[in-house]
Image (spheres, rainbow, N blue to C red):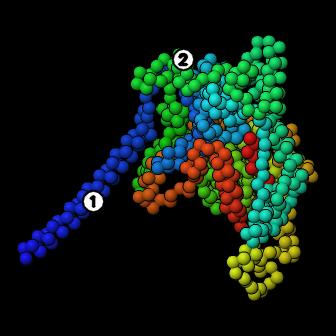
Amino acid sequence: MKAFFKQIVASFFGSCFSVLALGIFVVIGFFGAVGTVIMSFQATTTGEKPVDFPSEGSVLVIDLSRGFSDAPTFSPANNFGVFSNVKGAYGLLDTLRALEAARFDESVSGILLLGGNVSGAHGFASVMELRDALIHFRSESQKPVFAYLPTPGYKDYLLATAADEIWIHPLAELPLTGLSSTGLYFKNALENLGVGVQITRVGTHKSAVEPLISDKMSPEDREQRSRITGDLWKLTLLNIFSARSGKAESDEAKNLLAQHFSVAVEAEGYVPAQAALEKKFVDAVYYEDEMLERLKTHTGTNEQTHSFHQIALDDYLRASGISVEPPLVSAAFPLPEPDATVAVPQSIAVVCAEGEIVDGYGAVNEVGGAWFSRALRELRNDDSVKAVVLRINSPGGSVFASEQIRREAELLAKEKTLVVSMGDVAASGGYWISTPAKRVFADPATITGSIGVFGVLFNFENLGKKIGITSEAVLTAPFAELNSARRPKTPEEMAVFQKSTDRIYADFLNLVAKARGISVQEADALGQGQVWSGISAAETKLVDELGGLAAAIAFAKKDAGLDDDIEIISVPGEVHRFQELLDRFSDAPIPVANAGTQHALAGNHPALRSVLRNLERVAQRLRAFNDPNGLYARMPFDVEAK
């Protein structure tokens, strides 16, 4: 019996040791595999040739479903992590530089704009600048640009009109529906929940608070939305028609095309593929296999892939060194300190202010006042940086954070050339931070202005009553509860907040008047929360010049006396795609979840993605209401004309 128990005990402990040993081997194997993958990935992103493609004859493929962002292609804003199957947006500047490089690159024989099932996130100003760059590429290189749109969106079609040939799928419908701007209103929902909202504001058109206190669009907001969407529609339709009519062989053909456009817009909305071909809106109707065969006639057949010779834009960015993921680094494995004896090359910094302006450091796709002002301060103190282009793509937000950023921009402008490039939107706080610049560029389709201020004060008294919570307080002074959310503000308390709002608006007007060389009264006439297109802003002198990011960089080079080939750095910079994985094994913070959630929940369902996108924007706006004084300079509405 003793032998039996000895055998049982021995077997038990033997099994335990076996499991333990196996576990150790598995862990070692896992980390070894991860290390191998990381090392191999580092080898492809730190200077070695990352991709093989023929020395000539490849088509550069730009996937429009990924969209375009002001941030670099491999920045945190566009990096959804190694565990995500969602690809981030292309950097706008990266794409412009890639198109410029491809003009002279014999390995690139043309460009394919490839549409996806869902149109990527890109605004009108970005599309117009990319469109101009594609037209310049065609005219200077004599290389063709093709566009294949299986399910075209309006912005995709607008961009595709820069191509030599536009192809669509037989089941596709071309959207010539016009543009709309929709408002969501939560007054009744907040009342049902028991959440009270009180506001202060200056500006007849400062309607950013209307979704919280109204159940419908105000006449003033409707008027400015109509003005903006009307300007965008006329601008983009003119570009589409000009591009397509340029292929007409006679005045009669141009007149017929104009008639077709008019009928399509006023009476049809969606134009079926075959009808779009007959009306000369597109050049061919292809299934995907037919599109591939067409491109094979241009490049020949790749024997390995049995497709045409091609290179994806992100691979081309790596191969050309335009935008390269940096070496993998974390708090646990930092990079060595740079050698102080090595000369640092001179550079221009392109600083991207993209997203809501918030107090503190902010999250991904937000402009944190503390972080952003520190970045400008570091650039001011960096002798290698000779000029700064501040790229603004923000509807504004926190007044305090905006002033933090403006102050550092002002100090920088005293020592170096500071130029502002306005992207899709640069309004309210986004306009506030532009005021110190030597020159302000805006695209014709940029949304800007919105010079006004508002305050939002929530209270939860009725919500507390609904769930059985009451409250009382003891005060030492009449205004001791100014910052309390337990009850609505008294008229006297609201007067205090309104006085602060009026003061901040006066400060805003003074900043604008000084920057634009106009009187305070003239600034007030352009203010009142009114929103303007880039075209109108140029006419009213709210901006200096119409032009995109490339034009702003060119001006900064010339003004600072720099060579054309000077290095351009991006702030924030790139991040390695395996950074998230390594950070999980260190004390480094994990990035905030971002737009990849939309893809995960809604897939390619456009209507559901639209709903989720709107809800995400509402949540983001509520989260961004974190100004320490409760005052905001934000655009009155989100422009998603569609």
Asked whether the viewer can see residue 526, the reply is yes
| Image quadrant where residue 423 sits | top right
Residue displayed at 73% across by 45% down: 640
x and y, in percent, of residue 169 in the image: 62, 27
Quadrant of the rendering where the N terminus is positioned? bottom left
Please name whichever residue, 22 or 325, is drawn nearer the observer in this view of the structure. 22
Asked whether 633 or 170 is in front, the reply is 170
Q: Is residue 385 left or right of residue 256?
A: left
Instruction: Indicate the secondary structure of the residue bearing disc 1.
Output: helix
Q: Name the residue under label 1.
A: 23
Give the mark nearest the N terminus, 1 or 2: 1
The kind of residue tagged 2 is His
Decide if residue 347 is in sight here.
no
Disc 1 vs disc 2: Cβ atoms closer than 8 Å?
no
Characterize the local packing of mark 2: few (<14), some (14-19) or many (20 or more) Cα atoms within 10 angstroms.
Answer: some
Comparing 183 with 100, the one in front is 183
Q: Label 1 amino acid?
A: Gly
In the displayed structure, does residue 396 sit left or right of residue 205?
A: left
- Indicate whether 515 appears above or below 287: below
Percent across and percent down for residue 456 are: 77, 65
Q: Mark 2 points at which residue?
A: 298
Q: Which mark is residue 374?
A: none
Give residue 468's quadrant in the image: bottom right
Decide if residue 579 is on the left or right side of residue 509: left
Towards the viewer: 75 or 262: 262
At 14% across and 71% down in the image, what residue appears? 8
Helix, strand or loop at label 2? It is helix
Residue at image location 78% in from the left, 39% down from the top: 179
Q: Give the x, y percent position of residue 360.
A: 64, 62
Of the 4 image quadrants, the one containing the C terminus is top right
